[in-house]
Amino acid sequence: MKVRNNKLGPDEGIELQMTPMIDIVFQLLVFFIMTFKIVAMEGDFNIKMPLAALSDGLPDEDDIPPMTVKLSADAAGNLGSIRMNDIAYPTFQKLRERIISVIGTERGPNSTQATAEVELDCDFNLKYTHVIEAVTHVSGYVDPSTKQIVKLVEKIKFKPQPPRAG
Amino acid sequence: MRLNKKKDLGVLEGDLTPMIDMTFQLIAFFMVLINFSQAEQDDRVQLPESELAKPAEGPLDYPITLHLMKTGEEVVMGGQVIPVGSLSVYLEKEKSVIRDEGLPQSDATIVIRAHKDAPTGMVQELIAECQKNGFEKFALRAKEDVGNPG
């Protein structure tokens, strides 16, 4: 019987073919680079819009009355004025300061912070970005020292719009 | 002058190991970051920015994403452009899917991705349209503002 001599010589080594692997690896790399899309992080603001306004029952006497934030727009839809309970505020920062003073520092399930409610009354043509700006300033802030979010008002709702003319 | 004789060094073989290492690391990086999901994105909608917009800690139970265009008149839902007034037909389909999955409709959350310049009144009309169809939970989506913290 003929026996094949499989022994390699001293200078012979097994050479792996690297070319196909490198080809496929580069194709994969090109595919991932082409399909890569840098997407900014997104987050949600929950708003309270129950089906029936009276389904929750009458408000608790201990609850502070809802704070109505009125955002007026000019003809172009830009922010005209900010008012809360008929008091004008020049900036959203001032509005936030007022809200901080109203709800205080107490936190917990029955605290003023947990029960406070803000109703947004916005002009129809107001640009949506100003609504998010208002929601941001009303719902919390980033503590500059700890970089943590400090929550303010969590119950936010929209005042129903009057029906559009035409 | 004495000249060096050229020696026969054989075939020069470059070391491919660092290149392959690097390439595999790049592939791993892109694989981890790739996002095939198109339902959550729409290039036509530029979200408003907010310093408090952070990704949710857990996924929503049953999110229904509605993209409101700049004019506020049209909504993109599942890749289809729908006038706000005709949304009920499509929400009915979503309701039937929720029923088939055995979930209560109150578990569904309407995620509103509205363009930053869309009229607020139209956002409210969109919410009202969803309310008419029995949806109660809403989330207003914003883009994280990293440039202006505090």
Image (spheres, grey):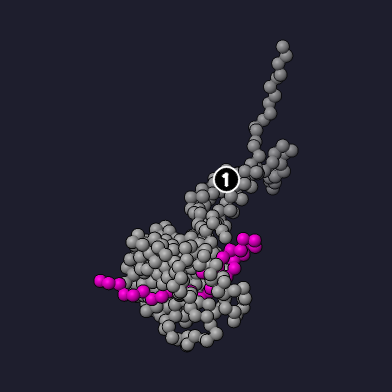
Rendered image quadrant of residue A150:
bottom right
Task: Please identify the residue farthest to the top as the structure is shown.
Answer: B1
State the residue position of label 1.
A22
Number of marks in the rendered image: 1
Q: Nearer the viewer, residue B115 or B28?
A: B115
Q: Residue at x 65, y 33 (%)?
A: B12
Relative to A55, is B81 on the left or the right?
A: left
Q: Residue at x 65, y 62 (%)?
A: A146
Q: Nearer the viewer, residue A61 or A135?
A: A61
Q: Residue at x 57, y 71 (%)?
A: A101
Relative to B132, is A144 on the left or the right?
A: right
Is residue B31 highlighted in magenta? no
Q: Residue B26, can we see it?
A: yes
Q: Nearer the viewer, residue A153 or A4?
A: A153
Measured as percent of width and height from the top left, residue A17 is found at 60, 44
Q: Which residues are magenta?
A: A137-166
Measured as percent of width and height from the top left, residue B82 is found at 33, 67
Q: Residue at x 52, y 58 (%)?
A: B145
> Is residue B38 depicted above or below A30 in this figure?
below
Is residue A155 highlighted in magenta? yes
Measured as percent of width and height from the top left, residue A135 is found at 48, 68
Q: Residue B122, can we see it?
A: no
Task: Please identify the residue farthest to the left as the structure is shown.
Answer: A166
Tell me the quarter of the image containing the C terminus of chain A. Answer: bottom left
| Few, some or many residues within 10 Å of mark 1 (<14, 14–19, 20+) | some
The amino acid beneath tag 1 is Ile
Measured as percent of width and height from the top left, residue A25 is found at 56, 48
Task: Please identify the residue farthest to the right as the structure is shown.
Answer: A10
Relative to A13, is B64 on the left or the right?
A: left
The chain letter for the residue carrying disc 1 is: A
| Secondary structure at numbered mark 1 | helix
> Is residue A153 depicted above or below B36 in this figure?
below
